[in-house]
Image: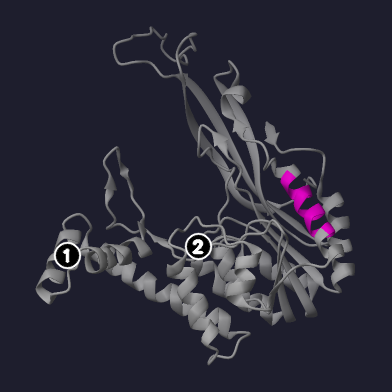
Amino acid sequence: MTTVKGTDVGYEDRKRLIAQLEQIRGSKVLCYILSDRETFPPNCPGFSAQMASEPHLLFVDHLRAIGRVPQLDLFLYTRGGATDSVWPLINLIREHADRFTVLVPFRGHSAGTLICLGADEVIMSDAAEMSPIDPTTGNQFNPTDPTNPANRFGISVEDVAAYFELSRERAGITEHSDKIDVLKELTRTVHPLALGNVQRVYMQIRRLAGQLLGLHMNEDDARIDNIIKALTEKFYSHVHAISRREAITLMGDWVRNPSEEEAIIMWNLFDAYAETLCLREKFQLPAFMGDQQVRDLTVVGGFIESADNSHIFNTNLKVIQRPNVPPNVQIQVPPGSAMPLPPGFSRAYDFSIQQIGWIANQQGV
């Protein structure tokens, strides 16, 4: 079994860095790190982890072990995930801390940005990024992928809103009867219940953002509406990286730069995670497989840890390599044997996941 991780930086090394950050900040630190490592071919299982409700009980365990504290810092790195995981996590953290800060060394995107909205303070390094919070929806009524009918396309909430804005602003469609025709045209390709789901999510994300901001801002503060509108509509692209300067301009003084001492230790801690997860290197599956037809692989894809406890997002899988044989080529294979790997053919890969999920970091990865 081969475990894919980077250098020998392990939990004991990170624990020392967490303790240093706690001393500098006068706080307790909880880390939530989710890998977004790229792979070739794309989307190899385990290398990219998403925020989800699954580890909620682990957060309960970590926070109870820490106890109630005056200041809790969440050290966060994520590309996002399930928005419904955010509100329970924020409320859980606030049950255990008088004051709550999010430390963003690099990426705190999408649902990670929602976590930031629920904090009393956000500290962003010079490399830190937030992102818009306009979600993409998916349910059984979404359009199917014609190249793979088992998959369904996600629908961006703001793309639907932009379609109607396009008809109004660019095409000049303002008459009521013509607007009905615009809607009918959309429902020819998108199921009405999928569009209904889009509307529900449209309202839910704005309500959630308002609730999160209301935890630390006056509900009458005009900035709340401005922040929500900007993060859901005004950046025009879900992949726009909101820099520290943009975030401070938009959100005000509850987003700030770290002190020089904070900046150094924040980056050192993030770098330790980046080295362990090999975030600077694309995983090359062909090189890993070589000429072997079957290999076992263990991938570490995330961390929830403090100075006292550590859990990892762990994926165990079996990778099967086979030639990508053109339809007009036949290869004789003895019964019960795997297809050989003749030279000159590209390779295809099948993945059999044996185990996936959060486990105790017993190896001190």
Q: Nearer the viewer, residue 232 or 340?
A: 232
Q: Is residue 331 shown above or below 88? A: above
Q: Quadrant of the N terminus?
A: top right
Q: Amino acid at mark 1?
A: Val
Residue 297: quadrant of the picture: top right
Q: Nearer the viewer, residue 2 or 275?
A: 275
Q: Between disc 2 and disc 1, whose residue precedes?
A: 2
Image point (41%, 9%), residue name = 333
**CA gap, disc 2 and disc 1:** 31 Å
Q: Is residue 32 above or below residue 168?
A: above
Apparent side of residue 240 relative to residue 78 in the rendered image (left or right): left
Horizontal side of residue 71 vs 289, given as left or right: right
Q: Is residue 304 above or below residue 278?
A: below
User: Circle 2: is it few (<14), some (14-19), or many (20+) Cα within 10 Å?
Assistant: some
Query: Can residue 97 be seen by looking at this rendering?
Result: no
Name the mark nearer the viewer: 2 or 1.
1
Q: Which residues are magenta?
A: 264-274
Q: Which mark is residue 82?
A: 2
Q: What residue sits 60% from the left and 67% below the top?
A: 246
The image quadrant where one finds the C terminus is top right
The residue depicted at 81 percent of the width and 71 percent of the height is 28
- Quarter of the image for residue 303 reads bottom right
Residue at numbered disc 1:
182
Residue sitting at 56 percent across and 39 percent down?
354
Q: Position of residue 117 (x, y in %)?
A: 59, 74
Q: Residue 224: say if magenta.
A: no
- Check residue 272 for magenta coloring: yes
What's under tag 2, amino acid-wise?
Ala
Image x and y of residue 175, in percent: 13, 75
Q: Is residue 55 visible?
A: yes
Circle 1 crowding by C-alpha within 10 Å: few under 14, some 14–19, many from 20: some
